[in-house]
Image (cartoon, rainbow, N blue to C red):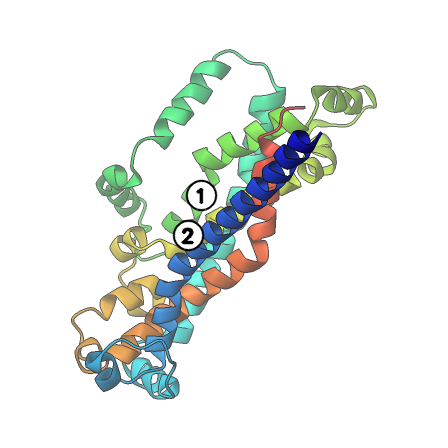
Amino acid sequence: METKKQSRTWYHTRTRIEKWLVYLLIVLIVVVCLIPFYTMLVNATRSGAQIVSGFSMVPSSHFFENFDSLLVYVDVWRGLLNSAFIAVSATILTAYFSTLTAFGFQFYEFKGKTILFTFMILMMMVPQQLGLIGFYQLCLQFKMIDSYYPLIIPMIANTFGVFFIRQYMAGSVHPALVEAARIDGAGEFSIFHRLIIPLAAPATATMAIMAFIVTWNNYIAPRVLITSLEKRTLPVMVGALKGSIVAQSNFGATYAAVAISVVPIMIVFIFASRYIINGIASGSVKG
């Protein structure tokens, strides 16, 4: 009896130690991930001379001076509006049409369905940068250079979004529900809007958040396709600071620009991370 009691006590002690080690490891990972962002925010509040003098984790009081210097060279508010318009529009299109396409792949039977879906997955493996030249020439022929259409419309065909939401539907939306709705006389679009969208909401929300973050951070396509200064997105404006007078004379202004471009993404992710985790977890369980 005494040996069993000691063994049980040692087991509970070891389990407790292992849990604390896991918690400690998680805290360390979080700290390592947050240090670059915190350093960026701190440097945004420091003057150029303070940044050059050395590293510091203590915020200073020069943020508004840096911001004023930044506004001389970059129209930050215009860049924010441009990025927000493109990101929100692309996110809405991605969420709706990815769910609609996933609905078709999951609940319809047609010739070549497997081949088409496999081809779509293969297209996910091809880097988008490889098709940038051809895409630019296509936009040139359709006279869409220096407009937001090439940055928004292609988001309708988001292959990863279709794949992700279809996998979620396969595990969480039973085909009998769709068949029951058809027997009751519901049309296909009615089934999609009233049944599928509510049931697939976690996956759609997850995909929408990811699409927003990717679109907001997109740099190469807006840099190539947008030529007017007033139409540039915020990441392009921040990238244009490299080598400029403000970047050479005031590092704090550069950090302020980077912080302003990153903070919206951080806010969206902080408030929406719960939906991302729930969507991925739900989609990974087959019913």
Residue type at tag 1: Met
**Residue placed under numbered mark 2 in the picture:** 215
Give x and y (percent) for residue 159: 44, 33
Asked if the residue under mark 2 is in contact with the one under mark 1, i.e. CB atoms within 8 Å, the reply is yes
Give x and y (percent) for residue 141: 27, 43
Cα gap from disc 1 to disc 2, whole angstroms:
9 Å
- Residue 260: name its quadrant: bottom left
Residue type at tag 2: Thr
Q: Which residue is drawn at 22% across and 42% down?
A: 133
Asked whether 7 or 274 is in front, the reply is 7
- Badge 1: few (under 14), some or many (20 or more) residues near its Cα, within 10 Å? many
**Rendered position, 104 above or below 267:** above
* Marked residue nearer the N-terminal end (1 or 2): 1
- Residue 9: name its quadrant: top right
Q: Nearer the viewer, mark 1 or mark 2?
A: 2
Q: In which quarter of the image is the C terminus?
A: top right
Residue 274 appears anywhere in the view? yes
Q: Which residue is drawn at 71% across and 29% down?
A: 1
Give x and y (percent) for residue 172: 66, 29
**Residue placed under numbered mark 1 in the picture:** 155
Asked whether 209 or 78 is in front, the reply is 209
